[in-house]
Amino acid sequence: MANDVYVIGVDMIKFGKFPDRTVPSLGAEAALLALDDAGLTIQDMQALYCGNLMEANAMVGQRVLQEIGQTGIPVVNCANACATGATAFREAWIAIKAGIYDVVLAVGVEKMAGAGLLGGGRKRKGIPTEGLLGSGTMPAVFGEAGMEHSRKYGTTFEQFAKVSVKNHHHSTLNPKARYQIETPLDEVMGAEMIAYPNTKLMCSVNVDGSAAAVLCSEEKMRQLGGSRAVKVTASALTSDRWTERDLTMPDVSTCTREAAKAAYEMAGCGPEDLDLVELHDCFATAEILHYENLGLCGDGEAGRMINEGEAQLGGRIPVNVSGGLLSKGHPLGATGIANVYEVCTQLRGEAGARQVDDARIGLTHVIGLGSACAIHVFEKQ
Amino acid sequence: MSTSPSPLLPAVPHLIIPESEEPYLQGSRCGQCEAVFVGTRNVCSACGARDQMTPFALANEGELYVFSIVHRSFPGIEVPYVSAVVDLDGGGTVKGNLIGIEPDPEKIKMGMRVKTVFEKTDRKDAEGNEYLAYFFQPA
């Protein structure tokens, strides 16, 4: 296919809490790491696509360049809820795919350590409706999404909790995750209930973080002798098609299913060909839905899949071996590119203790509520 | 001179408070594809039809579709509360607090019948205006 796109450099900072750092400085750090990984400099970059949500009105991409090199290149700042980083990555992919540039940089960055409860607090005229007309808080919204699965298939609180046990375990093998702490099932289930069925340990971690990737054309990749280059075989982005309850109860499944279908078609593969998946486990309940939405198992089989350990490292299809949003952390603008880092690192065979054996094809997935779903598929060369 | 209490304002625009009749929730239906929306609108986002939307009163009864029990909320908001997604009879899905039942996942049954009730809330706006809200309770 014309204009195949490759990732030739990718990295992330260890997610954490950096009260003394600015958003651009965190973005700059990841950008330099990714450039080093590619063996290139900012002078080689023809454009920058920057993902950041919470300072979306504040020219974060330009401010990153003001820290590492003001070369005058075009900068596009992207905001797309939790799909922000993946959207910036996709814009970079589109530019190469279109043949406009040969090599570009994508950066995702967010500062949100200690941000607390998200959603439900939107300012409106009159009186606040949170807790009066139900809840718009994210743990409750995704709690309700989980209960829909429970209603259809009998999925239990314990099965949802097992997702957290797995992802926290994976994060003990990832030095760049926010936490490296085992959380046994009784601890997950016994943690403070935030919004049933999500306990505190079943909610993603608000952290500061950044990640960046250098993307290039096939020709450029060959010029550079990219033996560690990873091919981007699909990029898909959807919004929320109208479904019966979507405007009251955000439907994260339909947009994921449509993006997955488009991505598998573009990549010329199916879920059975995947060696690992980094999916949007913003809450433990969400991961269960996405096993089915991404076709990793049949409808109604996600509960069995988590029970039987199929999604853990060493299982049939390892999911979120990075620790996922639940333990690696979820800095909104950085999350999508951090997923790309994990999959590329695995496909390069450089994932150390959490390496998936013979990983050849991997998929990344994020959902921005409101809604945006971005899926990318990567293949080892 | 007698002072009549100032009228209650609706907590959300789709709560209609007629002068001499019972309050109700307003929905609208698309004449082309029959999609039902909460509140009013000009264009159908299901099929894109323009000027086909007809407002109607949503039913006061329906079925609990799903719920969550919120134990952690923002400062000043009393917990726990049950956030309920309700499918109203005849179309329309509305979110609200489910009251009149213990906030216990063992007690709340998805699929149970619920009805809409309208009550004054303690919440006032900055000008001191008082508001009418809606709740769901087991039917």
Image: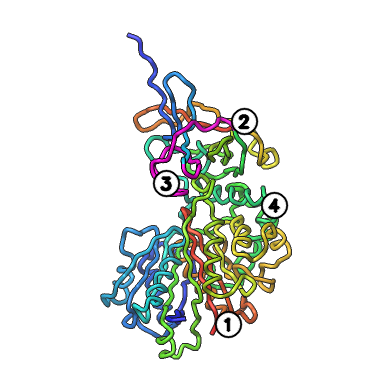
Residue A328 in sight in this render? no
Which residue, given by chain and number where applicable, does mark 3 sit on? B49
Q: Chain of mark 1?
A: A
In the picture as drawn, the residue positioned furthest to the top comes out as B1
- Display coloring: rainbow
Mark in front: 1 vs 3: 3
Q: Residue at x 33, y 67 (%)?
A: A76
Q: Chain of mark 4?
A: A
Mark in front: 2 vs 3: 3
Q: What segment carries the magenta color?
A: B32-61
Q: Residue at x 43, y 30 (%)?
A: B10
Check residue B100 in the rendering and tell me which mark sits there, or answer none: 2
Horizontal and vertical percent position of residue A209:
45, 66
Horizontal and vertical percent position of residue B58:
51, 33
Residue A142 in sight in this render? yes
Which residue, given by chain and number where applicable, does mark 1 sit on? A349
* Amino acid type, mark 3: Ala
Other-residue count near label 2 (Cα within 10 Å), few / some / many at <14 / 14–19 / ≥20: few
